[in-house]
Amino acid sequence: MNETPAGPTVLVVDEDVGFIWWLAELLAEDGYRSIPALGCRQALSLIKSSDGAVELALVNPRLRGATRLIAALRQYRTSKIVLIQEPEAPHSPIEGAIAFLEKPAGSAPVSRLEWRQKLRRLLLQIGIRAAS
């Protein structure tokens, strides 16, 4: 990847470094700018340094500080929030979140193509499109 995509900015917040970097890579391939964060404190710092220019945040609600992060994201009218859910975990709605994205199960094979399609469907559903 030589160029930074110019599309919408997506913040990805989870403690699983492999997962967030993999998601960031998939998003970049489809023209989105992605900002990976390993925790809520780091995510808050990144939001402030980007002047709130985050169109979508994918956030694991089980992280320490997630409630505070989601409240901060809701202050930015352009931010949409999707909750990253653990496999088989019940989906607990959180005010401000508009959808769920279930992580792959630890032992299940992961298809890159299937995940790109899953992300594309999610982004289309919530109305976020990459720059063409």
Image: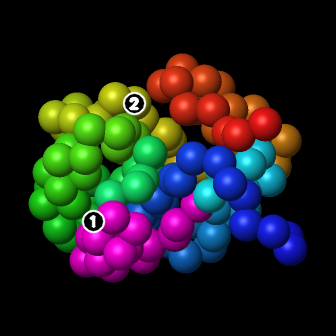
At 63% from the left edge and 70% from the top edge, which residue is drawn? 21
Q: Which residue is depicted at the point 35% across and 43% down? A: 79
Residue at (22, 35) in percent of width and height: 96
Location of the N terminus (image quadrant): bottom right
User: For this rendering, which residue is in front, 115 or 80?
Assistant: 80
Q: Quadrant of residue 81?
A: top left
Q: Mark 1 falls on what kind of element?
A: loop
Q: Nearer the viewer, residue 76 or 11?
A: 76
Q: Which residue is mark 2?
A: 99
Q: Is residue 22 visible?
A: yes
Other-residue count near label 1 (Cα within 10 Å), few / some / many at <14 / 14–19 / ≥20: some
Q: Position of residue 2 (x, y in %)?
A: 86, 74
- In the shown orientation, is residue 9 left or right of residue 115? left
What is the three-letter code of the residue carrying label 2? Ala
**The residue stretch that appears in magenta:** 34-51
Residue 98: percent from the left, percent from the top? 34, 29
**Is residue 3 shown left or right of residue 51?**
right
Judge whether 97 appears above or below 108 on screen.
above
Magenta includes 36?
A: yes
In this rendering, the count of numbered labels is 2
Q: Which mark is residue 63?
A: 1
Answer above or below: position of 122 versus 111: above
Q: Position of residue 24 (x, y in %)?
A: 64, 61
Badge 2 marks a residue whose secondary structure is strand
Q: Examine the image and state in which quarter residue 6 appears.
A: bottom right
Q: Are marks 2 and 1 in contact (CB under 8 Å)?
A: no
Residue kind at label 1, given as amino acid type: Leu
Q: CA distance from mark 2 to mark 1?
A: 17 Å
Q: Residue at x 48, y 25 (%)?
A: 126
Residue 64 occupies quadrant: bottom left
Whichever of labels 2 and 1 marks the residue nearer the N terminus, that label is: 1
| Residue furthest to the top | 125
